[in-house]
Image (spheres, rainbow, N blue to C red):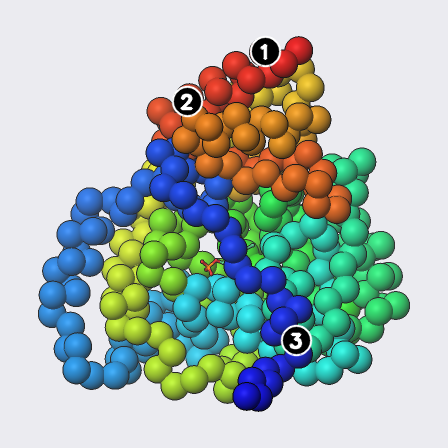
Amino acid sequence: MSFNTRNVLSEIPSYDVVEKDWPIKVNANECGMNLPPMVAERVMSRLSRIAFNRYPNEQYLALTEAIGRSFGLQPDNVLLGSGSSEIIEKVFYAFGGGRDRKIVYPWPSFSMYPIYAKAAEAEGVAFELSADDNYELDPKKFIDFVKKENPSLVVICNPNNPTGTVIKKSDVEYIAQNVDCALLIDEAYIDFDISESVTDVLLKYPNMMIARTFSKAFGLASARVGYMLASKSVVDIIGRAFMPYHMNVLSLVTADTAFTMRDEFIPRINMMISERKRMESELKKIDGIKVYESNTNFIFMNYDKAVQLNEALEGQGIGIRSFGNAPLLTNCIRISMGTREENDVWLKAVMDFVEASV
Ligand SMILES: *Cc1c(COP(=O)(O)O)cnc(C)c1O
């Protein structure tokens, strides 16, 4: 029998994050709390009135209007996706399509970029960040690199996952002015450092697209909703890569409710930020652990026994993200902020491990 798929599929790793039911789950940068009760109640009441027999129409428009309005934009500046993952994947698809078409991104960054590049049959090109520079991006060097590579698309994750580093808004604009191709800014964590967002200057740069998600600060990872902001013509052309009715009404209504009630999320976003600061200052007291500056809801650090520490924490039911010996990330660990109680538990486990192994 012939079962002849595209060659590239066998080169794509399967997404095999072994997920256990961790008693303390701080490995995926999710929000540690379920929806605020008032929001959950409103979601349930709206879901009970859905016309399940109809394709999604007005619900899609309602959410694009609400999102657009909040940024001083029009509905046709907004494209919704099943998580910002779908947005990013389609943008890669739109700018890929040949080995001579390059997609450049600083690296290390979001693990899915190289995979989407491959799937789009583009060449993913990494601009390497160095631990010696605290993984900070030098805009001038980056622009020079982009000019040399001449890609069809540049992707910048700001703040960056997994390093937590932020790029100043002025530097993002400087890059936008100096690269002669499409530019996608992945703002998955920008709610934790909103002053560096470029949404308010978006329309100055016809090459710019911004991806946002409800999965992290807004704690809606289950619903899979994200969005892209861009000029009308960019939204129109990228939109053609999506199938009709790609967003389901349950997720649209849930995200619309959360977005309408977004003020309810501010206290918990502030709590995640203050917990990160508290954990950072505690971890910095521990000899042998290097904590990088983070502007997100997670902490990124280096420890020479990172792999053993990860195993020890696993044994205690604590799921964190260890990068093993991945290039540029050897002995690095990423821990998302849980509740205050959860953070106290993993911090104690880290301190006990370090103490026992000196
Ligand atoms: C989590 C994450 C996303 C996408 O999340 P979705 O759940 O698909 O919206 C995108 N980019 C980065 C850097 C992320 O960490």
Element assignment for label 1: helix
* Mark 3 and mark 2: Cα distance apart in space: 43 Å
Q: Please indicate whether residue 324 sits to the left or right of residue 187 in the image.
A: right
Element assignment for label 3: helix
Specify the amino acid type for callout 1.
Glu
Element assignment for label 2: helix
Circle 1 crowding by C-alpha within 10 Å: few under 14, some 14–19, many from 20: few
Q: Point out the tag, 2 or 1, that comes first from the N-terminus.
A: 2
Residue denoted by label 2: 345
Up-down: is 129 above or below 116?
Answer: above
Up-down: is 140 above or below 333?
Answer: below
Question: Residue 355, which numbered label?
Answer: 1
Up-down: is 304 above or below 182?
Answer: above
- Residue lying farthest to the front in this orientation: 1
Which quadrant of the structure image shows residue 183?
bottom right
Residue denoted by label 3: 8
Rendered location of residue 246, percent (x, y): 38, 78
Image marks 1 and 3: residues in contact by CB distance under 8 Å:
no
What's the residue at 84%, 69% (across, down)? 149
